Image: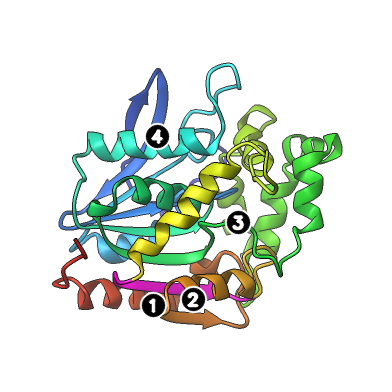
Amino acid sequence: MAINITKEYPFTGKALDLDGLRYHYLDEGSGEPVVMVHGNPSWSFYYRNLVLALRDRYRCVVPDHIGCGLSDKPGDDRYDYTLPRRVDDLERLLDHLNIKENVTLVLHDWGGMIGMAWAVRHPERIKRLVILNTAAFHLPAEKPFPLALKICRDTWVGALLVRGFNAFSLAASFVGCKRNPMPAELRRAYRLPYDSWQNRIATLRFVQDIPLTPGDRNYELVNTVAAGIDQFRNLPISLFWGERDFVFDRHFLAEWQRRFPGADVHSFADCGHYILEDAGEEIVPLIGEFLDRTATKEANP
């Protein structure tokens, strides 16, 4: 790792052994647990400023999925890069840390499906939800599947671009912010863990694991999650949305609002996918205020 990110990411990470694989995570602060789940192609670095803002009064737990961030990046012979395994990993971590009540989930990108699948398994543990440009349901009917994702998902050319040239992570670091484009050093920090063919395996496998039609692997699991999340509609929920996300656009936001009509909504017309980078100076304090305001509100039984 050629660049030093200690200043931006001033944490001492921990690791859980998952059947011989190193599962890296942050565990900062104390108090009610706030579990932050990242997506693809980012890593726990995405939540760094939120952790710094909350750790004085909340316990912030932020895993790096296997193949991502500072976790191990094994080949397919040692790890099953699929949604059910991601959910199992998160469950093992939270059980290991004895996090079993009053959980706030902060979810972005693939973290929405992973985190909400875990929540549907354990609804009694969930107190609040913070939802950032993500989904826990199938592609809305009004939203075409982006061509760039289709190429990466379904073609050898896409696989070559993602693993050979780091095209997915590279592109995300440029197009993920609209209001405040990432400076070069920040783009390098996001791409830092994905510096070789082997280390980009999860970046590709995440895209290949997107279920689009009945019969696709994990399509039924997404059905189950989509049907199960409605039980959370009366919890405190806050939505933060970059409307210029080329995947998780206003169609996804509309679906969340349909499912959670009582949620607080903060939508940013000039921001993109990496909403915590694009509008972090506004959003991080708003998340803190939301958590503090709902601290004494009881979760639904």
Q: Between residues 244 and 213, which one lies in front from this camera angle?
A: 213
Q: Earlier in the sequence, mark 1 or mark 3?
A: 3
Three-letter amino acid code at the position of disc 4: Asp
The alpha-carbon separation of the residues under discs 4 and 1 comes to 28 Å
* Quarter that holds the C terminus: bottom left
Q: Residue at x 36, y 69 (%)?
A: 233
Helix or strand or loop: what does disc 1 sit on?
loop
Crowd around label 3: few <14 · some 14–19 · many ≥20 (10 Å): some
Crowd around label 1: few <14 · some 14–19 · many ≥20 (10 Å): many
Q: Earlier in the sequence, mark 2 or mark 3?
A: 3
Three-letter amino acid code at the position of disc 2: Gln
Considering the whole magenta stretch, tell me its main secondary structure: strand
Q: Earlier in the sequence, mark 3 or mark 4?
A: 4
Judging by the rendered image, the residue that carries numbered circle 3 is: 138
Above-or-below relation of 116 to 251: above
Measuring from the top left, give residue 171's x and y in whole percent. Answer: 72, 55
Measuring from the top left, give residue 275's x and y in whole percent. Answer: 53, 69
Q: Residue at x 34, y 64 (%)?
A: 232
Q: Earlier in the sequence, mark 4 or mark 2?
A: 4
Q: Between residues 196 and 158, which one lies in front from this camera angle?
A: 158
User: Which tag is nearer the camera, tag 1 or tag 3?
Assistant: 3
Q: Which residues are magenta?
A: 234-243
Judging by the rendered image, the residue that carries numbered circle 1 is: 263
Q: How many marks?
A: 4
Three-letter amino acid code at the position of disc 3: His
